[in-house]
């Protein structure tokens, strides 16, 4: 590789890093927008601390857990020291990744917090702040990099006869978050007033422009999330990924629009917004493999799944205020399977490998989050008390309101 | 061209693609901010669906209509198949555009929805959702790419003795939207309460921070809109375009500030915001041609024009809630003429060519939008009924409010 | 340098330009969010005009003042004509900066307005619009470029035996704003109701999501602010700067979280947000020098300083609505000193040079802003009258409200 190509690749990876960074603002805005005004400070607080936490823990341990090196090839766990130590030639093309060691670190570090951010949405409006941050510390610092190592760090999912395939993380990033989300929401129980007997009460989000900003910023950042996962500026590959990503997102909007219109007879903007995210999560595992029409089909199906997912989780009384489980877990699984179905890889053997990846990662993440959440539930407690929940977490945990100048209803 | 330069050019075009993408959030925020809270969900819904619609239709037909190939050189219409089929060598510098086929597609596709987005602002707060989406489908999928073909696809405006000049689309993008906007606003009629006899009642936008976000995001994205229209990362050309673009926007702010202060004796932020957009639209046709001082003059005049435009359209009782017609049509025309005046091209002959482009495109777009809107007006209807307009489109078309937790005035 | 490297470097500097541009939206959002709804239009107006003003003045005089050329080497002041005239070979690698003349200009021009933006926050909610804009004109057009010339333009701070070191502007950009802020806030006096005898009344910001957007956008843009200050796309250097920048920001969040929790026993999101900015300002002077752990330490200390700074300035009755002085001045000084302490440069001599830079720039900026503000105070006046302050600047200076559809408290 020439110095020029090395510099270009590195530049693209840095731009992708920034794009993934701004996704954290997208998550913050989406989650805040789809919940009530009395909990907005709490949600923004969590979503501001999480990327900070992700960067620091990834520098101390996460990066070393996720890429422990050849000695742990095919394994389940490895640790390659603590902290960042710059290898010889880290800033030249001698560092054989096509970009520098620190670019490698910072791009991966920006992903790390995502798993906890996804959980944040599903447990919103009722979880205690301290326990949530403690969970996030462990989930981002330990659980996510271990799972990431299984595939991207050369672990057993990568060395199977038919390797598990997950281009940019439908499973490794989004489902990891989704499994923690489902466990957290289950152990916490629903928000007060959400379910009454057989009836599900919609609790509308307080700020739809904020939610819309969130989704557009996530889509914007996703070009770096998927495009950066090419790991070079290779013109053919990056432009290919841009096109599949954009078309899947667009198709997801239409899938959710159609499904929600048929189901609810209304033009539901929150479903369309989640449909875009559904399309994006669905294409993430195979964004480098799909033809134009396949990207559209995969995204469209993802968009419909998110609508049925929301209905389903309400039916089984798992209260997910922002639909995070449907978007990230359901579509994460769908996108990962779609690689086996459409991806023109190893046929039936590939589908089996995809299932192995989905199941092993699911079991690990469910067990990890159960242990952490359940231990806290039996000790510190994980849920705010009833009065605090009714009054809002903002005034009780933070001593302030998000919009003190405005009169509220109720 | 070396592999390195090909990769750099392609990278810049991809970054420009993302920048144009985020302009759709800018449009959504601006339009929502400058209208009333009771219609916010409706506006965000439209502006979320439109880019999705644009991407899908451009993949199916728009790109083939706009770039039908040499066989249609000098013509008015051409169609080169349906859907995207990757040409041989599409991802190498053998594809002679300096970037890949898919980069070409996705950059152009991000532009496509803009025409409908501009219309959206002018018809806001009273148009029925279904008919608007149907209009958008036809305008984005058919009208815009046909007009684009006339110049950028090698059509008759490009092959005239003195070719029409429109660097990044003052006419081809912005005026196309503007003509549809003026026709839509005319056929719909003004919002209830806007005009009473000789009096024009201001209907203030409900969220000025949202509108401000919109304009800054549009300015941000415009560096990709204009800068990407260089179609390469050529250092001299791209930096030239960045400077003219930034200075015209800044000068537009001052032009609108001065004109609105003289006219209304107040520091009107909505005029300053529209002045920035006016400067941007005005420089778009000749961003690669103008000297520093010319960019400032063109932007400044654009900024003043937007103030007079708003007053003028109110005088003739065309109700444009966000000033879209003044920004995109008036300044689109001004910027296109400015190329003839300042651009150091073919003198009087150039001005004539610019006029030919403006007029032929105007006639086509007016006719197209008249046929579509008028047909719907006489069949399905295009305007919501009075009660719905008074209560707001959000609760009637979408069954929800944008800010359900807050108490509203009235 | 090859044409390819020239093109890549130029591309990165252009991207950095856009990233710095969007910081102006970040400042606008942060300042508006942390103040009251009745002054929001005024704040957005200022923050929209300032970057426009910065671009125009920098084109006319600022750039020529800041980079007057070799003839003024080691000096205090120089002026190299007026306006932009393109030097021979400005767009090729003959222009020996590694990017084009116009890229050089536009990147620097985007920085220019920052100084006034910082002042804007500290004087918010009580300063008259006209006088503030006049101050901004002089501060951005004259004061900032003169100070910038002292170091970046080859002036006396750059030619000392041990040159002053300020990588991306902890002092040259942020403290310059901070000194103006402290003088403005001092001469204006506190907002009505802020201090009563010994009691400090918190005046909470009206829109925490807006403030959060502001900080994330500033962090996002800071990758261009610091990363662009490498002045090339050099992979090792840019990725190094990205990592120190990101880690310092993250550590700043934790420093402020800890200090504010110990001090106030609450999870204060505004402190965490300011802590992120504190970390960013603190690392800016030495982002290219610090090891990972040093960046974390510097950012963490910055985060704690901002909490103590806010308490301190309240104690001495300097009312700074958004904490701008603590963030930009206190942490600007801290970051500049940290270069001497951690930076592995010239030891004690370096610390002395850093102090010389801090003090000479501080004295100049204090004197400059005193003369401008004090002259206006004695003539036109700089503070709105009491009734206007109580009713809000929006309705009095701009004749409109930021959120007219919502019911407010009080």
Image: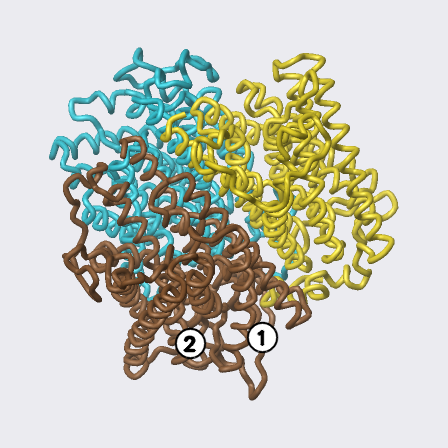
Chain colours: A yellow, B cyan, C brown
Observer-nearest of B170 and B352: B170
Decide if residue A401 is on the left or right side of residue A318.
Answer: left
Chain letter behind tag 2: C
Which residue: 51% across, 67% down?
A: C35
Q: Is mark 2 in CB contact (under 8 Å) with mark 1?
A: no
Q: Are marks 2 and 1 on the same chain?
A: yes
| Label ID, residue C202 | 1
Observer-nearest of A36 and A86: A86
- Alpha carbons under labels 2 and 1: distance apart: 17 Å
Residue wearing tag 2: C185
Q: Quadrant of the N terminus of chain B?
A: top left
Give the secondary structure at mark 1. loop
Q: Position of residue C207 (x, y in %)?
A: 56, 61
Chain letter behind tag 1: C
Give the secondary structure at mark 2. helix
Decide if residue C397 is on the left or right side of residue A139.
Answer: left
The mark that comes first in sequence, 2 or 1, is 2
Q: Is disc 1 surrounded by few (<14), some (14 to 19) or many (20+) residues within 10 Å?
A: few
Q: Position of residue C400 (x, y in %)?
A: 44, 65
Which residue: 67% across, 25% down?
A: A336
Decide if residue C127 is on the left or right side of residue B345.
Answer: right
A348 in relation to B158, above or below: above
A124 in relation to A7, above or below: below
Note whether residue C400 is visible.
Answer: no
């Amino acid at each position: 590789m020439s110095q020029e190509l090395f510099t270009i690749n590195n530049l693209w990876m840095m731009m992708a890093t920034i794009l993934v960074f701004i996704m954290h603002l997208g998550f913050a805005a989406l989650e805040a927008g789809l919940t009530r005004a009395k909990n907005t400070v709490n949600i923004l607080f969590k979503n501001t601390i999480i990327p900070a936490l992700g960067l620091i823990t990834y520098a101390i341990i996460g990066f070393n857990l996720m890429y422990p090196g050849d000695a742990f090839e095919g394994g389940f766990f490895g640790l390659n020291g603590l902290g960042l130590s710059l290898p010889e030639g880290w800033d030249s093309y001698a560092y054989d990744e096509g970009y520098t060691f620190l670019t490698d670190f910072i791009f991966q570090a920006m992903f790390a917090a995502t798993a906890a951010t996804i959980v944040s949405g599903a447990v919103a409006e009722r979880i205690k702040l301290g326990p949530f941050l403690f969970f996030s510390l462990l989930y981002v610092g330990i659980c996510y990099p271990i799972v990431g190592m299984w595939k991207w760090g050369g672990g057993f999912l990568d060395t199977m006869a038919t390797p598990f395939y997950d281009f940019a993380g439908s499973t490794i990033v989004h489902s990891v978050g989704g499994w923690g989300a489902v466990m957290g929401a289950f152990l916490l129980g629903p928000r007060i007033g959400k379910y009454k007997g057989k009836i599900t009460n919609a609790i509308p989000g307080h700020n739809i422009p904020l939610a819309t900003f969130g989704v557009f910023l996530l889509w914007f950042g996703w070009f770096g999330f998927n495009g950066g996962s090419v790991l070079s500026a290779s013109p053919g590959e990056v432009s290919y990924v841009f096109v599949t990503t954009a078309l899947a997102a667009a198709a997801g909007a239409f899938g959710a629009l159609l499904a929600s219109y048929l189901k609810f007879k209304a033009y539901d903007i929150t479903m369309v917004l989640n449909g875009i995210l559904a399309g994006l999560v669905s294409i993430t595992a195979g964004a480098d493999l799909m033809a134009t029409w396949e990207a559209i089909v995969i995204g469209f199906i993802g968009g419909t799944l998110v609508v049925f997912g929301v209905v389903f989780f309400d039916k089984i009384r798992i209260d997910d205020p922002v639909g995070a489980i449907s978007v990230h877990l359901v579509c994460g699984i769908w996108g990962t399977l779609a690689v086996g179905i459409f991806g023109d890889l190893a046929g039936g053997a590939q589908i089996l490998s995809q299932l192995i990846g989905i199941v092993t990662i699911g079991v690990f993440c469910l067990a990890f989050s159960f242990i952490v959440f359940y231990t806290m539930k039996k000790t510190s407690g994980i849920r705010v008390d009833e009065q605090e929940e009714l009054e809002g977490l903002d005034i009780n945990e933070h001593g302030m309101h998000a919009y003190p100048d405005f009169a509220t209803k109720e």
